[in-house]
Image (cartoon, grey):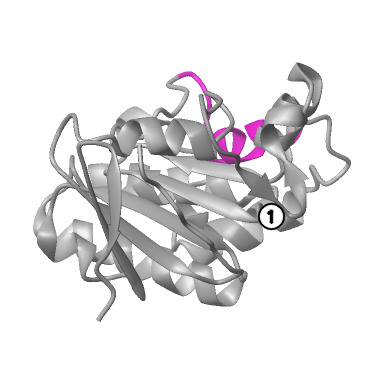
Amino acid sequence: KAVNLSLHAGDFVTIMGPSGGGKTTLLNLLAGLDLPDKGQIILNGRKVSDLSDHDLTLLRRKEIGIVFQFFNLMPTLTVMENVELPLLLAHSSRTDGQRIKTLLNYVGLWHRADSFPAELSGGEMQRVAIARALVHQPAILLADEPTGNLDSENGMKILDLMKQASTDFQTTVILVTHNPQVAKIGNRHFEIRDGKLTNKTP
């Protein structure tokens, strides 16, 4: 209804709101999964609503990474294969093992490269999901309640990792949550309620 948001490289943005307040709808719009009825979304100078279905798919595969609450790892693939998957789907030439190894080291899980998701803890699975989301060097990382399925200790580790990644890779992170404590982690804070976005940055 009333969303006006301008983001820059390296921003860590948290958007807090209740269930049904519009958080998931906003993420779907930012990911190009849905198109707005009014207004526009511009990414790196391109109006998303003007892109063809093919170009939207390329946008999602190459410029946007997504981290989900429930990890969404492929159970029959190893940790390394899960991280490599976005590159294969994008037909990328960057499927070399060194980049994947670097990212798994970054999230502290290279020693788990040959493990399957069922052998990992919840915190480890979410770290794999973050590595997978970063493997194609996206401009934007969208996180949908990434700590919602974790205990507080592992949740904080995930938040710290995502905040560090936003700085190290100059990736714009947009995280939605219903948890006020999680919302504090960002350098920019917003609240969405009944489809209206309000800037809460101090």
Front residue (pair 106, 130): 130
Disc 1, SS: loop
**Does 81 lie within the magenta span?**
yes
> What is the chief secondary structure element of the magenta stretch?
helix
Front residue (pair 167, 126): 167
- Kind of residue at disc 1: Gln
**Does 72 lie within the magenta span?**
no
Which residue appears at 45% of the width and 74% of the height? 164
Residue 99's x, y, as percent? 72, 56
Q: Give the quadrant of the N terminus.
A: top left
Taking the image as shown, residue 168 lies to the left or right of residue 63, namely left
Front residue (pair 156, 99): 156
Q: Residue 195: which quarter of the image?
A: top left
Taking the image as shown, residue 89 lies to the left or right of residue 11, namely right
Q: Is residue 146 visible?
A: no
Which residue appears at 83% of the width and 37% of the height? 92
Specify the segment rendered in magenta. Answer: 76-87
Dot 1 crowding, Cα within 10 Å, few <14, some 14–19, many 20+: some
Residue 122's x, y, as percent? 24, 42
Residue 169's x, y, as percent? 62, 69
**How many numbered circles are shown?**
1
Q: Is residue 93 visible?
A: yes
| Pointer 1 residue | 137
Which residue appears at 43% of the width and 38% of the height? 27
